[in-house]
Amino acid sequence: MLKPGSLQGDSLEAGSMARAIEDAMVAQGVLKLDDETADAAELRRKTFVAIATGVINHLKSNVEIHFAIDALGPGIPTAAKTLQGSNGVLT
């Protein structure tokens, strides 16, 4: 399950997209956690939560999955089904 994450004390929720963004930035050397003030770190983490929330909400609203049902072999038509997201609900 995709989850944007939240602030938990002075860190981001483990297993969340926001935490994955922070971890990736640290791993790439883009972000040095020791060089920040506490206020700057909190604002940055809130920004990551906001970005992750936006990405996940966008994916939920715009997901489109196509798959074939009962593909029995050559010459036999398959039924196609599309699942589309609408405000986070697959229909």
Image (cartoon, rainbow, N blue to C red):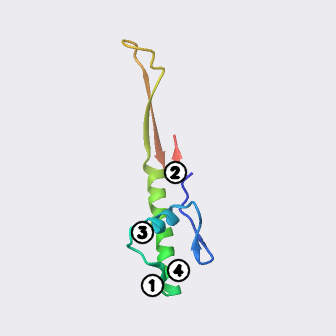
Would you call the spot at circle 1 few (<14 residues within 10 Å), some (14-19), or many (20 or more)? few
Marks 3 and 1, how far apart in space? 14 Å
Identified by mark 3, the residue type is Met
Residue occupying the far top of the picture: 75
- Does the CB distance between marks 2 and 4 fall below 8 Å? no
Query: Residue under circle 3?
Result: 25
Disc nearer the start of the sequence (4/3)? 3
Q: Nearer the viewer, residue 29 or 86?
A: 29
Marks 4 and 3, how far apart in space? 16 Å
Residue under the point 50% across and 65% down = 18
Position of residue 24 relative to residue 77, above or below, is: below
Marks 3 and 2, how far apart in space? 28 Å
Q: State left or right for residue 85 relative to residue 1.
A: left
User: Dot 2: what SS?
Assistant: loop
Residue under the point 48% across and 48% down = 86
Marks 2 and 4, how far apart in space? 28 Å
Identified by mark 1, the residue type is Asp
Identified by mark 2, the residue type is Gly
User: Dot 4: what SS?
Assistant: helix
Query: Residue under circle 4?
Result: 42
Q: State left or right for residue 8 relative to residue 23.
A: right
User: Dot 3: what SS?
Assistant: helix
Report the label total: 4
Marks 2 and 1, how far apart in space? 38 Å
User: Dot 1: what SS?
Assistant: helix
Instruction: Kindly identify which numbered label has been placed on residue 4.
Output: none
Disc nearer the start of the sequence (2/4)? 4
